[in-house]
Image (cartoon, grey):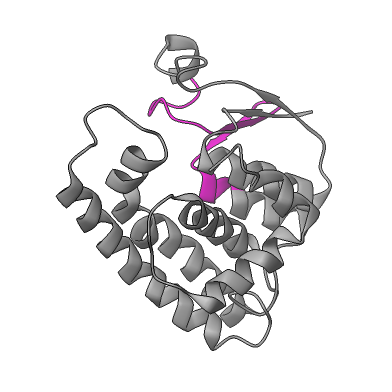
Amino acid sequence: MLRVLGRVTSINVRKVLWALDELGLAYEREDWGLPLRDPKVPEFLALNPNGQVPVVIEGDFVLWESNAVLIYLAEREGGLLPEQLELRALALQWLGWQASELNPPWGYAVNALIRKTPGYDDPARIADSMARWTLKMDILEAALAGANTGYIGAGFSIADIALGLSVHRWMSIAVEKKELPAVADYYERLMSREAGARWMGPETP
């Protein structure tokens, strides 16, 4: 049985769980990650020296980094990635973009407005975080507006799982923000998927 170590409040853990559900794969999940269970203990660090979730274990095979897990599952099961090389590369382009470009700008705003983390209360920094985040969302809006599949590429893929969870965070943040109609349509489409609705619920922003 495949095991997933990580708390469901982690966006990166939910990437993996959503993919597993889309593929119809059975798994067991164990709570790891603060405030539930400290991943900086020797037991966990032996699996992932970064002390971060998720970690996936299957027999003697241990894998960390959520995007690596998504690619592994898609490759192994033969789904959630296009077969044509160019289309596959474009899906992986957006998967990488989600982690490297879309996610970093939201850090301060999410800590301030969703997580309510102490010390994240500077209005100027919140505004700056939202402005930088909006610029990245504008890129996604333009890409989705020009798509004819309803998804970011040739069809639903692991890139849409990652982007969908980021869009869910955008939709969940309680602040005035720019209207992005293509992104809103995309969000509704992803929410119409059973696994999408499960892992983009109101309790997991």
**Magenta stretch holds residue 82:** no
Q: Is residue 19 left or right of residue 114?
A: right
**Magenta stretch holds residue 68:** yes
Residue at (21%, 30%) from the top-left corner?
119
Q: Quadrant of residue 202?
A: top right
**Quadrant into which the N terminus falls:** top right
Residue at (75%, 50%) from the top-left corner?
195
The answer to whether residue 106 is above or below residue 179 is above
For the record, the magenta segment spans 46-69
Along the line of sight, which residue is nearer the eye, 141 or 147?
A: 141
Can you name the residue that lies furthest to the front here? 176
Q: Quadrant of residue 156?
A: bottom right
Along the line of sight, which residue is nearer the eye, 37 or 83?
A: 37
Residue 59 in percent (x, y) is at 71, 26
The answer to whether residue 167 is above or below residue 64 is below
The answer to whether residue 134 is above or below residue 30 is below
Residue 173 in percent (x, y) is at 44, 50
Residue 113 in percent (x, y) is at 36, 42
